């Protein structure tokens, strides 16, 4: 596996403009999976807000195309890191690179993959890749930025989960499991950081029009178009949720606050009922 390649091809004038833009309130945003889909639009929107960027994905040429378009449009500094987040050496390299960068103020853990198939037909390689990218890399990169964020009592971590975290279908056991991990991890982390200035948000999109569907083996064209959101709508709504202080953002759900309150009430009722210390009567002779 080749070493991750780092590139920062901003022109001198871009760098000067970016230094004007990148004040303490914005700083550098790291976006994983930024070569396409939701991640590429996060990169665009965060640059529009004044962030310099570090963009991560495997396809260096495609990633560099996204980066250059953003430099041209907003004059911010954009660094690209070509890395496979399922590869231990690449992941360690990205983690150490961002851990040492005090200018980073935001991490968007967006990179994710799906293989929609019954578990028995998924294969060890595809299963591991889903867990490595969706779960392991997200935790590792979170751990990389967290000490700096807690030290400065600021910073934002956005974790892209999915509505698949809320319910499984026979072909989504692994994907839903990985996205449920992200939801649970983010909720727990948000609780740990509640008294600090560090922000954490989990975003749970419904279906969004990206290549991810075709890559997952379920063509986008097979979905009911009425259920599919555009990428800009999804990212703009998710950033709107961030701006209003949400920890859990469901871009496509109208009555999210009420439904989440009911969902939490049911979860915590079940958790509370589990603290009885005795087997339930149905398990007794
Ligand atoms: N689209 C939806 O309907 C939907 C719904 C809910 C949640 N989500 C979540 O949203 C996130 C983005 O999905 P998307 O639909 O935008 O997918 P996408 O269009 O397929 O883009 C995935 C991105 O992740 C990168 N990536 C994939 N594997 C990688 C790896 N091993 N190492 C580094 N980068 C990798 C890809 O770049 P390279 O190929 O260049 O590496 C690409 O930039 C994912 O976490 C996904 O689960 C999507």
Image (tube, rainbow, N blue to C red):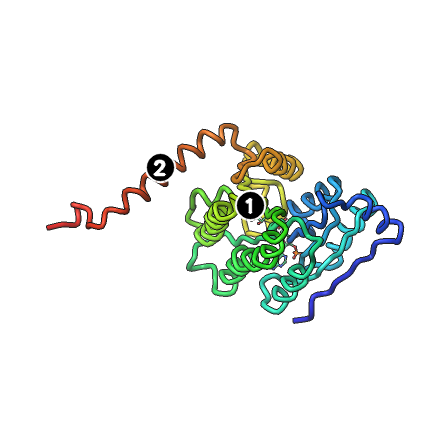
Between 43 and 242, the residue placed more toward the observer is: 242
- Give the residue at the far left of this rendering: 285
Residue named by callout 1: 196
Residue occupying image coordinates x 68% and y 62% = 97
Q: Give the position of the N terminus as an image quadrant.
A: bottom right
Residue occupying image coordinates x 66% and y 46% = 37
Query: In the image, 44: left or right of 147?
Result: right
Spatial CA distance of label 1 from label 2 is: 28 Å
Q: Tell me the quarter of the picture where residue 100 sits.
A: bottom right
Count residues near mark 2 (Cα–Cα under 10 Å), then give few for <14, some for 14-19, many for 20+.
few
Of the two numbered discs 1 and 2 in the rendering, the one whose residue sits closer to the viewer? 1
Mark 1 and 2 residues: CB-CB less than 8 Å, in contact?
Answer: no
Q: Secondary structure under badge 2?
A: helix
- The x and y percentages for residue 57 are 67, 57
- The x and y percentages for residue 281 are 16, 45
In this picture, is 164 found above or below 233? Answer: below
Residue named by callout 2: 266
Residue occupying image coordinates x 76% and y 45% = 23
Q: Secondary structure under badge 1?
A: loop
Task: Give whichever of discs 1 and 2 has the lower sequence position.
Answer: 1
- The x and y percentages for residue 229 are 60, 36
Query: In the image, 21: left or right of 242?
Result: right
Between 159 and 196, the residue placed more toward the observer is: 196
In this picture, is 78 found above or below 124? Answer: above
Between 230 and 265, the residue placed more toward the observer is: 265
Q: How many marks?
A: 2
- The x and y percentages for residue 96 are 64, 64
- Give the residue at the far right of this rendering: 13
Q: Tell me the quarter of the picture where residue 42 sits.
A: top right
């Amino acid at each position: 596996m080749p070493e991750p390649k780092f590139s920062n091809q901003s022109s001198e004038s871009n760098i000067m403009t970016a230094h004007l833009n990148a004040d303490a309130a914005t700083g550098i945003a790291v976006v994983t999976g930024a070569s396409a889909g939701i991640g590429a639009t996060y990169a665009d929107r965060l640059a529009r807000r004044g962030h310099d960027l570090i963009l991560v994905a495997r396809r260096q040429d495609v990633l560099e195309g996204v980066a250059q378009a953003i430099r041209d449009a907003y004059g911010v500094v954009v660094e690209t890191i070509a890395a496979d987040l399922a590869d231990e050496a690449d992941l360690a390299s990205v983690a150490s690179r961002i851990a040492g960068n005090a200018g980073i103020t935001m991490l968007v853990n967006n990179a994710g993959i799906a293989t929609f198939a019954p578990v028995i037909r998924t294969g060890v390689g595809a299963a591991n890749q889903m867990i490595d990218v969706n779960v392991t890399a997200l935790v590792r990169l979170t751990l990389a930025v967290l000490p700096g964020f807690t030290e400065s009592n600021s910073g934002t971590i956005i974790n892209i989960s999915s509505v698949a975290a809320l319910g499984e279908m026979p072909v989504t056991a692994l994907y839903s499991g990985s996205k449920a991990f992200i939801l649970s991890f983010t909720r727990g982390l948000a609780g740990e950081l509640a008294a600090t200035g560090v922000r954490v948000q989990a975003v749970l999109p419904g279906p969004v029009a990206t290549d991810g569907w075709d890559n997952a083996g379920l063509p986008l064209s097979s979905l009911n178009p009425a259920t599919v959101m555009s990428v800009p709508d999804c990212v703009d709504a998710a950033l709107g949720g961030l701006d209003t202080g949400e920890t859990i953002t469901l871009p496509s759900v109208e009555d999210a606050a009420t439904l989440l309150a009911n969902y939490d009430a049911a979860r915590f009722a079940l958790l509370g009922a589990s603290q009885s210390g005795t087997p339930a009567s149905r398990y007794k002779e």
